[in-house]
Structure formats: C-alpha cells, structure tokens
Amino acid sequence: GACGVAFAMTFCTLGAGYGMAKSAMGVVALARLAPEAMLRGLIPVVMSELLGIYGFISSINMVKNLDIDTYATFAGYLDLASGLAVGLSCLAAGLTIGTIGEANVKAYGLLLRRSQYTIKGKTEAASPLSPGGKDWERLE
C-alpha cells in the first residue's frame, strides 16, 4: 500500500516536473517572439502542474485507507496497482505535454511573428527569423 503511494507521488512529480520544464522553454521562446501572447503560452505549464496535484490527491486517498489492523493483503496489492497506474500515466502525460506543449507554443509564436511583419509593397509573409529593418514594416 505504501509503495503505491510512493510510486504515485514519485512518478506524478517527475511527469509534472518534466512537463513544466519543457513547456517553460517554449514559453521563453514565445516571450522572445511574441511577448503579447505569453499568457496563452502558459496553458501547457498549468496542465503539467495539475498532474502533480492529481498524484497528490490519489496518494491521499490511498493513505487514508492504511490501517495496520484492518488492512488486507488484497487491498495492499490494489493500492500498489492503482499507485503504479496513476503514477505511470501521469509520467507519460507529463512527457507528452512537455514535448508537444513546447513545440506548439514555439509554433504559435512563429505564427504570430510571421503575421505581424510584411515586406513593403508585397503581400508575402516575412520570415519569422527576420528581426525587422528598413525593408520591413510592422502591421498594426
């Protein structure tokens, strides 16, 4: 039973930490490309935080059933299995949220950057890597 609690907390925290770290790198890139859209870029970070909270809540539900006098072996295996299921699924979700969140937030920043600049006299979209200069004008 206690191992299930430990597995749930450990794996959920690892998944949440990885998801937040990877998504935060995308938010930093978004801050450089389109600072006005930073709040929208924080959505994957918040989703990753919820994974840690989910692991904490499921661990509390398992801990409140731990009683040395009435705790059966079957209940211990159930808590171990549920801790592994919750923990590993949160770990997988954290890996996914981090990787896809970073890529999508960066792509969103590039899209906003590309739509803000245009070449003078032409309707083509500017390169997202161009910093702007005498040949570029900002659209308002």
Image (tube, helix red, strand yellow):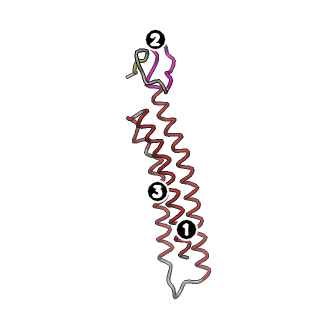
Is 126 included in the stretch rendered in magenta? yes
Dot 3: few (<14), some (14–19), or many (≥20) neighbours within 10 Å? some
Q: Which residue corresponds to mark 3?
A: 50
Report the amino acid beneath label 3.
Answer: Leu
Work out whether 118 lies above or below 107. Answer: above
Q: Nearer the viewer, mark 2 or mark 1?
A: 1
Report the amino acid beneath label 2.
Answer: Gly
The residue furthest bottom is 69
The residue furthest top is 121
Q: Are the two marked residues, 2 and 1, in contact with CB atoms closer than 8 angstroms? A: no
Query: In the rendered structure, which segment of residues is drawn in magenta?
Result: 115-127
Q: Position of residue 136 (x, y in %)?
A: 43, 17
Q: Quadrant of the N terminus?
A: bottom right
Q: Which residue corresponds to mark 2?
A: 121
Work out whether 96 lies above or below 84. Answer: above
First in sequence, mark 2 or 1: give its number.
1
Q: Quadrant of the C terminus?
A: top left
Q: Which residue corresponds to mark 1?
A: 7
Residue shown at the point (52%, 59%) measured from the top left: 14
Report the amino acid beneath label 1.
Answer: Phe
Query: In the picture, residue 28 is in which quadrant?
Result: top left
Label 3: which secondary element: helix
* 133 horizontally vs 71: left or right: left
